[in-house]
Image (spheres, coloured by chain):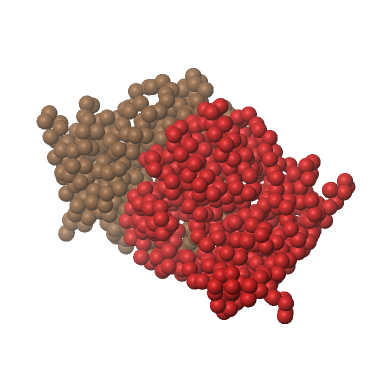
Chain colours: A red, B brown
Amino acid sequence: MKRYEALAELIAADIRNGTLPPGTKLPSVRKLRLQHQVSPSTIFEAYRRLEDRGLVRARERSGFFVLGTGTLLEPKTSMVLAQPAQVDISQLVFSILGAVQDRNVLPLGSAFPSPKLFPLPRLAKSLASSARYIDPWETVASLPPGHLALRQQIALRYLGMGMPQPPENIIITNGALEALNLCLAAVAQPGDLIAIESPGFYAALQAIERLKMKALEIPVHAKDGLDLDALEALLAQHPVKACWLMTSFQNPMGASMSEEKKQRLVAMLTQRQIPLIEDDVYGELYFGNRQPLPAKAFDQEGWVMHCSSFSKCLAPGYRIGWVSPGRFGKQIEQLKLMTTLSASVPAQVAIADYLQTGAYDKHLRKLRHTLESQLTLMNEAILRYFPAEVRVSRPQGGYFVWVEFPEGFDTLRLHREAVELGISIAPGPIFSASRQYHHCIRLNYGGNWDGYYDKALQQLGALIQLQLSGC
Amino acid sequence: MKRYEALAELIAADIRNGTLPPGTKLPSVRKLRLQHQVSPSTIFEAYRRLEDRGLVRARERSGFFVLGTGTLLEPKTSMVLAQPAQVDISQLVFSILGAVQDRNVLPLGSAFPSPKLFPLPRLAKSLASSARYIDPWETVASLPPGHLALRQQIALRYLGMGMPQPPENIIITNGALEALNLCLAAVAQPGDLIAIESPGFYAALQAIERLKMKALEIPVHAKDGLDLDALEALLAQHPVKACWLMTSFQNPMGASMSEEKKQRLVAMLTQRQIPLIEDDVYGELYFGNRQPLPAKAFDQEGWVMHCSSFSKCLAPGYRIGWVSPGRFGKQIEQLKLMTTLSASVPAQVAIADYLQTGAYDKHLRKLRHTLESQLTLMNEAILRYFPAEVRVSRPQGGYFVWVEFPEGFDTLRLHREAVELGISIAPGPIFSASRQYHHCIRLNYGGNWDGYYDKALQQLGALIQLQLSGC
């Protein structure tokens, strides 16, 4: 990393953790020169970079200021402990997510970033050029575990993170969603108890409901992710068959566990021989200076199934994901063969071709900066339009914030009112088996940000004010 | 249809049903002229066409002869009635099909035709040209039920068969295999009893095993498919929750039910409100003069889920299939959203583009003729190399023959010995929940037929002789 990049990252970290709150003037060049022993040009480069990332703004003749006009409180969302339970959430999820499929609805409730943030034309070139060379035999050769060149490229990315996973251990799937569902079916049976995050990704709830298993909710904190002490206590009380967790930039809170916590998590589960289904689809979308290691990096004995995909970073409609399945590879591969046979060959070949060009990392850098600067815009709009008592999570990556209103606030009502205005949101209850978090919502700042976003957040703020004032 | 085509088809039907056995000389031009009131040139055109199709051969100065050198007996395979049972067949299927994934093994046991029979370069052109115009919004718009232009093209094909299914009723899936599995999960629960064909497609057995349901085997006859009387008797005795059947060119026998039988089947099931999962992936591969109507064509009340795909006729690696789901659309669509979200967008768009060019029907005509002439080659080789006591089914479409050896013959042994020689076959027991048909095999004549095929069938014949002679 260049010196100005390192310096920019130091300052960005202070902005993210609140040490430099919105509105603060950045230190003078003279002060930083003395403090960090760097040249004035390095400091200017670092500031320009922070400006490019949308974190600070230069004001004429007065220096650089942190964007935003106030301080957002962090959520103190806490979970009410619930007994292991059958899950019955699917119909609520479908009724709420239906709104996102309307092109005219502003997708603050969507689970995807805008496809316009992806290099679709470049990817189409890979699709077109590689299509001509697909060996007819590929249709057989790409049966699970999947297209070899693609598995090799994925293995190289693991290697780059310092956590080698050999290509022969990787199974290509129809997006991470299929990988996660296959993992669950491979390690648990109807009636089994699955530990999940609360609030957590609704697809985990739907999978547990579909497979007639039971859910045990473990609390997640906005700041540092899963509550490991709570998990340990609950594991002592209940016969948990598997865990399904998102360890980095968690959906819906945006929270992450530290690498130390991930290591402790793996040790805790390995000791009890409990499989971990790790959903890491947002791992590449970090705002810090390197990708956080997933729990899989600490897995010595193969109890962690690491699932990810290209759907959130590169090629949403291609439906290509994968799992590095630890000791459960054979079961997962056979389940895949029995249910969907293989992933689409042209999509596999095109993504392998694209990765081979080396363009992916450059694209990811740009995407991360776009998302980080849109997070700033989202926070500014929330500060401007939402009442002062709302609390907002401070994600270090991904594209979700978790917004908490005062207790008693009804976000299902807010959802209905927002849809009337052509705006979708994701209300809290869809993220909990016991339908908690009625006063919380998930907002997506990864959309195609334009004037409509500001307007929509203004309208949403007005609806919130209205409900809070008792109307 | 032109007059010479109609005449050719009349004669082809006589060849297929054995009225004109192999070696027979075709009637003279003079006789046919009188009989059918057609011109000599029409008769010559018809004979040339039959020659192109590989059904007859001209011998210099002596006329046209039906290919083959003897008469193959039809199988009399009969099923031993079995009680409803838990299924435990998956591991046997996997161990046997593993051999097909080796490029150096001659795939007589494969479930797919050779990908070289497909217009892959033309399809790659559609992929390349349509990739450039994929609207980023497609990644959202192509969520289930799927890409609209593709559903419209599929609806047009239904319309062409005289059985309209509107595009909004069609759900795109990852191949027919996913469609079938989703249908089963949509209409039945663990413990439920599912009526299936015997012998029948092993994927149905694997799905029933995976979902912890029970199988009730219904006999299928090589000549006319499912035994409806047996089905009716068994429905009276057992609480069947759903049927999973392949009504045309059935896998593994190649047998078809007549349209009258399909109509009776639908009436029987509708009266009892039992859903029918109809697997029709080989329907387009008919050798007659039109595609046989599926059972779905007679479904007035929505109890039939009609599943098909492009994997067996056009684009095996693309993984695009569909279901016209009758009254079960909503459940199936939601299960799809929960497990694999959507089918690959580039593959959907490319196939829609290809179908819009109108090239599909021309390709299918060529493919059918290739398969029909390869069936003749397969029959000739069996007559030449296999002992006289083997019996072989006479499919009217598709690319499978069912070969029956004398009782007591061990095809699992034959499979092991064949694999040693680099040849795969599909032994009978993988087609039955109760592991019957030890003396039968399924052979695939849809491979890339070349000198190796003849050699392989000769080697297989030698192994069969060896076992029959008690060695």
Left or right: residue B198 versus residue A80 is left
Q: Nearer the viewer, residue B193 or A247?
A: A247
Reply above or below: A65 against A76.
Answer: below
Q: What residue lies at 36% left-to-right and 57% top-to-bottom?
A: A152
Q: Quadrant of residue A327?
A: top left
Q: Position of residue A85 (x, y in %)?
A: 61, 30
Reply above or below: A141 against A40.
Answer: above
Q: Position of residue B362 (x, y in %)?
A: 41, 61
Q: What residue lies at 41% left-to-right and 55% top-to-bottom?
A: A162
Reply above or below: B409 against A154.
Answer: above
Q: Nearer the viewer, residue B401 or A446?
A: A446
Left or right: residue A305 versus residue A312 is left
Q: Quadrant of residue B292?
A: top left
Q: Nearer the viewer, residue B448 or A205?
A: A205
Q: What residue lies at 49% left-to-right and 21% top-to-bottom?
A: B238
Q: Position of residue A5 (x, y in %)?
A: 53, 70
Q: What residue lies at 38% left-to-right and 22% top-to-bottom?
A: B82
Left or right: residue B246 versus residue B94 is right
